Image (tube, rainbow, N blue to C red):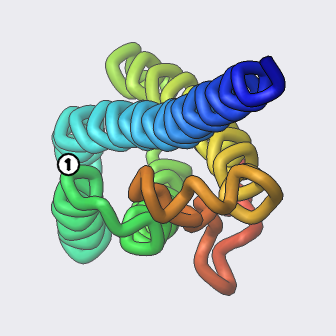
């Protein structure tokens, strides 16, 4: 009778450990998938932002065609932003975003010299869309960093850290602005 109870206890403990292992594995994988989805949200907003740029450049080009250097810088930044949005390097995405912000700041500074441009309905609509996209992008970055924080806490704390190698989940990099690009450019109209 004592050996039967011992066998039952061992079976219950083994089943409990297996269930705990499945729980740990699934918890880590779900947190990792949430991070991937959150990065996808950033990519969607970066792509939306890049898609608005040609219309903005064409609108400005009609009023300030001689500002070709600024327009070329915006076009180059857009190209870098599109490439970064399709990649997986978080640092490259942040750097491309910072380059685009700087180029747009210069573009809007040029626009200040053209009152007719600032009053054009197309330009105002594009500015509004760009501002909305910037707000959505800010939210997407925060959501990603929150998801990364939860994942990193799991990967680095007991008991989940023991399941991280089995599940293939690793610590992820936070989305941070590159050095020198932390402050938003001040653009006045």
In which quadrant of the rendered view does residue 175 lie? bottom right
Residue 135 visible in the picture: no
Name the residue located 59 percent from the left edge and 42 percent from the top edge: 144
Q: Position of residue 142 (x, y in %)?
A: 69, 41
Reply above or below: 183 against 40. Answer: below
Number of marks in the image?
Answer: 1
Q: Nearer the viewer, residue 40 or 132?
A: 40
Reply above or below: 164 against 179. Answer: above
Left or right: where 54 falls relative to 77 = left
Name the residue located 59 percent from the left edge and 78 percent from the top edge: 178
Q: Position of residue 52 (x, y in %)?
A: 28, 33
Q: Residue reaching furthest front?
A: 1
Left or right: where 112 falls relative to 58 = right
Residue 69 visible in the picture: yes
- Residue at mark 1: 61
In which quadrant of the rendered view does residue 59 lie? top left
Q: Nearer the viewer, residue 136 or 131?
A: 136
In which quadrant of the rendered view does residue 157 lie? bottom right
Name the residue located 42 percent from the left edge and 17 percent from the top edge: 125
Left or right: where 117 falls relative to 19 = left
| Label 1, residues with CA under 10 Å away: few <14, some 14-19, many ≥20 | some
Q: Position of residue 88 (x, y in %)?
A: 30, 60
Q: Nearer the viewer, residue 37 or 155?
A: 155
Q: Position of residue 106 (x, y in %)?
A: 48, 65
Q: Residue reaching furthest bottom?
A: 179
Reply above or below: 39 against 83. Answer: above
Q: Quadrant of the C terminus?
A: top right
Q: Nearer the viewer, residue 95 or 115?
A: 95
Q: Quadrant of the N terminus?
A: top right
**What secondary structure is marked by label 1?**
helix
């Amino acid at each position: 009778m004592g050996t039967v109870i011992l066998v039952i206890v061992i079976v219950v403990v083994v089943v409990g450990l297996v269930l705990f292992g499945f729980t740990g594995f699934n918890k880590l994988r779900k947190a990792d998938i949430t991070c991937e989805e959150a990065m996808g949200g950033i990519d969607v907003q970066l792509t939306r932002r890049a898609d608005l740029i040609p219309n903005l450049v064409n609108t400005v080009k009609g009023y300030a065609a001689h500002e070709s250097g600024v327009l070329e810088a915006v076009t180059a930044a857009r190209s870098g932003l599109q490439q970064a949005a399709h990649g997986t390097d978080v640092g490259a995405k942040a750097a491309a975003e910072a380059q685009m912000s700087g180029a747009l700041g210069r573009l809007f500074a040029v626009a200040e010299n053209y009152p007719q441009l600032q009053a054009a309905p197309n330009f105002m609509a594009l500015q509004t869309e760009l501002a909305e996209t910037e707000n959505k992008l800010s939210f997407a970055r925060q959501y990603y960093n929150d998801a990364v924080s939860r994942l990193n806490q799991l990967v680095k704390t007991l008991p989940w850290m023991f399941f991280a190698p089995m599940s293939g989940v690793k610590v992820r990099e936070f989305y941070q602005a590159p050095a020198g690009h932390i402050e938003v450019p001040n653009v006045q109209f």
